[in-house]
Amino acid sequence: MNSPLLFTLLVCLTLFSYWYGINRSLKVAGGTEHKKVLSCLPKQFGLLTAMVCGLPALITLLIFNSAEQLVIEQLLTATLPANIQALSNIDLGLYLNNIRFLALSESNQALLNNLSSSTDIALNIQLNAAIAIQKLEQQAKWLKTALVLVVSLVSVIILVRKFSITYEARQKSETIIHALLVASSAIAILTTLGIVISVLFESIHFFKSVPATEFMFGTQWSPQTAMRADQIGGSGSFGAVPLFAGTLLITFIAMLLAVPVGLMIAIYLSQYANSKFRNIAKPMLEVLAGIPTVVYGFFAALTVAPVIRSTGEYFGLSVASESALAAGLVMGTMIIPFVSSLSEDAISAVPKALKEASFGMGATKSETVIKVLLPAALPGIVGAILLAISRAIGETMIVVMAAGMAANLTANPLDSVTTVTVQIVTLLTGDQEFDSPKTLAAFALGLMLFITTLGLNILALKVVQKYREQYD
Amino acid sequence: MTNSIDKNITGNATPAKLQTKLSTTEKVALSLKKRHQKERRFRNTGFSAVLFGFMLVVILIGDITTKALPAFHQHWVKLDVNYQSDWLSVDANLSGYELTQQLKTANFRKVLRNSLYPMFVNEQTPKLSRKDKRSAFKLFSSNAEFTIRDALLAAPEDLNETVSIWVRLDDDVDSYLKEGFAFGTAGLRIDEQQAQWVAKLEQEQRIESRFNTSFFTASDSREPELAGIKGALMGTLLTMFVTLLLSFPLGVAGALYLEEFAPKNRLTDIIEININNLAAVPSIVFGLLGLAVIINLFGLPRSAPLVGGIVLTLMTLPTIIIASRAAIKAVPPSIREAALGLGASKMQVTLSHVLPQAMPGIITGGIIGIAQALGETAPLLMIGMVAFIVDVPTSIADSATVLPVQIFLWADSPERAFLAKTSAAILVLLTLLLVINTTATVLRSKFEKK
Amino acid sequence: MNNIEITQDPLAQVELTETVGNIYADDAKMSIRNANVYYGEKQAIHDVSLDLAKNQVTALIGPSGCGKSTFLRCLNRMNDTIDICRITGQLMLDDEDIYAKNLDPVLLRARVGMVFQKPNPFPKSIYDNVAYGARIHGLTNNKAELDEIVETSLQKAGLFNEVKDRLKDPGTGLSGGQQQRLCIARTIAVSPEVILMDEPASALDPIATAIIEELIDELKEKYTIAIVTHSMQQAARVSQHTAYFHMGKLVEMGKTEDIFTHPSHKLTENYITGRFG
């Protein structure tokens, strides 16, 4: 039985167990009319039975599924001839993939027919292996079905035997639910751990072949040449400085647009606009925040970039078709509502008394805003800007679609630059083996990205928190 | 106010002696004009910033809408197809099942060619050159031969007859008809000869513009006139299904624990900080996690909605937890106390009193999380949902792509017609998001009224 | 703010008629005639007329919600910032109508300063707090002049000796009473003609309150002061004139000693004898 079907069956079994648990508990009590003698309600017995039926079996299924491929691969590799087993990991992986493809695409009968008609030894090995895989997978399916069913039934039987009048079904089921709740909240931690481990692990791998200093301070980025043996040292150059510079340039352009506009919007909406205007303006501006980044990318690449290019040419400037300016401006557009809503929160958090004091002295609104509100809200605004920067640095789609691939080290916004995220996408999309420095470089870049954004975020939260304490 | 005082306002270098003689009121009065000007400037700057924001929204939506409109209709051309059995190389004496079998593999390309060349000959050029033939053939969609095949399969009695059949024009011709660009426009591959032929076809009223249904009923294709979003929509649906199924229960459970059960200790603090920080981790990093852990370590299939859903779950979980916690916090403590006072256990109070009360807020948060996941592209590129996939996925383990990734793929295609397709797909995506967000807003306002 | 729940008032049956006592001052700095204030549909102040005597302290007293703070805020147009607030009547500062179209509220507020209930120093240094008004209004040409203004203002507010060594420290670091005196110093730094005080000592301890009260007594030499207060003792101690407000109406006004020794109106008597309030 395949997994979805098995899962459905398991759900049915669980529902049945609920009913079964209720029935058993009533039997223990000696009939429906005596259900009051039980320490818990029958439906609580049912709930416990259902959970005991479903959960262990579900965990078994998940573990089985995740281990299945690996075990089959190991078993298969053991049966292959020695010369194939001796292949490097990468080649062996490719070889196994071939066999798997054969096993998937051809029916068992077709493989057998091919085998009997073919005389090519290498092909025969593959065909045999494919047949072996099909057999192994068939066996695995049966084993899985049996295992899951046995686990669920046995756990129910063991549980039901323990039922008595004083059995604390409710407390037991609550303990299980509690454990599930704890597990759910632990997923956040596991996710972070997973990110750190996966990114760090691959990065360490990468830093074995490329020194960390070269990566951090080198100014040459050309991972594509890593394939060519005649390159110096046999590997491409992985100096990430142009990437960092490109990321910063685009982020800077984005901030140059987003911070003043976002801040002025926040000031206008919180201090000048009447509530009617605000109720229209805010959802309208939130549209900008709700548009998917891929749409911004499209807009940047196909509308903004050509406009900038032709404008630049009109003034006799040479503009790259994938200029940093286009990507930066569109990214700034995306970030405007982010800056404005966070700044507005910060400005609104300034106590009204300060505003009144300033008005009471005869200050105009703009003087009050500039000399009292903004300085008082500064930490909140700085926090907002830090978060916005972190967002711009990690933004991917806009730059993938509108910024270039060439790692130019330049501060000219009309030139094409590339960014950390663009390179991660470029290095990891398409087919390539997992262990080359080229793919591992993507993880090293990911590590940089993660550390930077995490640092900015923690800093921003600290600043904002300090600021809140000031007025609480 | 006298003129002499006015002069003092404009002259920056007001003699100190003069000013010290003035009373405070007079000094303030002197400064007023300038200050009010500044005030007006500041206010106008703020207003222009808001207008600028509006303008960006309008330009963005307007630009995409105008680019998208051509994709919703498509030009078809009427051909007089002569189903000659010897062109098809089928046996005209057959009938029924055997004929159908033969027709399925028959040479319809020859029928197509032989049927359309006569349309382009006239007195001056009684016979088309090789080059002309090729360029005439290029006017029609590569799908045309299948269209005429399907027509004959549906009505086998037309064999050896000449019938009028509508087929799609090629995407370049289609774009040319829609946009009326000059020859030589980048990406538009149509020459003057072809343009004349198209004009002739139009004159003969053989060309008709129809609503482009295949945009919604077809999957991705290399040919723009055939490409549709059904596969991507289905992939999105499956991915969102997985995301919803995982992120909602996990998010709610996590929020319930943190808000109702968690002891106030260091570990809880760490979890809280962690969740806040995860919400700000770039989405692409979640893609790296998916690639390294879910695909390479756990061995789940690449490109599958299952993996996409898991990655998006991890990404949206912080959003949902934060929103759910806010909703749970908003449940008045009196409800908890009342239920506890009646002898209910903490778990019973939480599940049967607090949770239902907080549900509308939680659902709103969940919808916002889903909307975020729906528009996400970058992490899905990492886990291989970027492949060119023609088949409509039917299960969460099939290779699939999603709407935003489809947009990304099409935006990269050089064919001019894909520009409109991309914009149209964006419009569909934005409409979906609008529906989802409106639902959230309506739910929230309903909830707030209560 | 100023919700007048007529039905809940225990003395609602006592009819409010014309103001009793003497609303006129011989030397009036401000004179208000027939002022009405509305918040949207609700009327918060009904037909109030009174004079603020020059270089004297006028106390506005009354139960909470009687409109005394609202009235005070009309005197330097602080209510302008509330959209739904509307004011009619004649409010004169010297001979100018402060609600005249061509009168600039900025200029008015420079002439009529305000001290608020809760000390509200800006989160800036003590020096910058006091210098704020002078800077925005452009009162000085150089640093020396500004220094002088700051010093004299702090001296007038009786704060200079306590803070002269730490003028660069944040104003928010001072004690509550010091903060309030800082706010007074900030207000007098622009040399206003009138100072409005909205319960300036209500957030302070008795010792700080006593210092503020002494200060008010000194300040009246140079400024005309109107003070809203909850405490009748305070009104008796610092003011020369007292106006008693009830439900948005001015019930009685007169010399402070008269009001407190033999009030003419039943409501005033009930209030100052502590029957309600």
Image (cartoon, coloured by chain):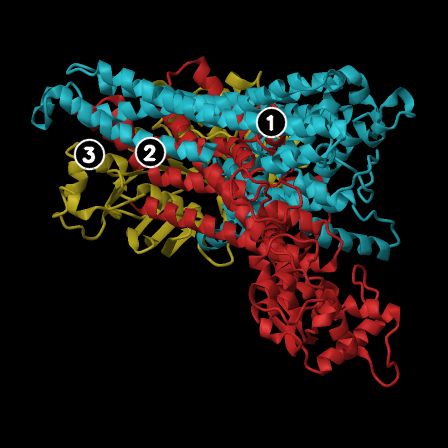
Chain colours: A cyan, B red, C yellow
Which residue has dot 2 on it? A12
Q: Nearest the camera: B336 or B185?
A: B185
Residue under the image location 74 percent in, 47 percent down: A326
Asked if residue A453 is positioned above or below residue C50 in the image, the reply reads above
Q: Do the residues indicated by labels 1 and 3 lie within the same chain of the protein?
A: no
Q: Residues within 10 Å of mark 3 (few under 14, many from 20)?
A: many
Q: Is residue B129 left or right of residue C244?
A: right
Residue occupying the far bottom of the picture: B123
Question: Helix, strand or loop at disc 2?
Answer: helix
**Mark earlier in primary sequence (1, 2):** 2
Asked if residue A438 is positioned above or below residue A320 in the image, the reply reads above
Where residue B188 sits, quadrant-wise, is: bottom right
Residue A174, x across and y down, in percent: 29, 21
Asked if residue C173 is positioned above or below residue C276 in the image, the reply reads above
Q: Quadrant of the C terminus of chain C?
A: top left
Separation of residues labelled 2 and 3 (CA atoms): 80 Å
Amino acid at the residue labelled 2 = Cys
Question: Helix, strand or loop at disc 1?
Answer: helix
Amino acid at the residue labelled 1 = Ile
Asked if residue B176 is positioned above or below residue A306 in the image, the reply reads below
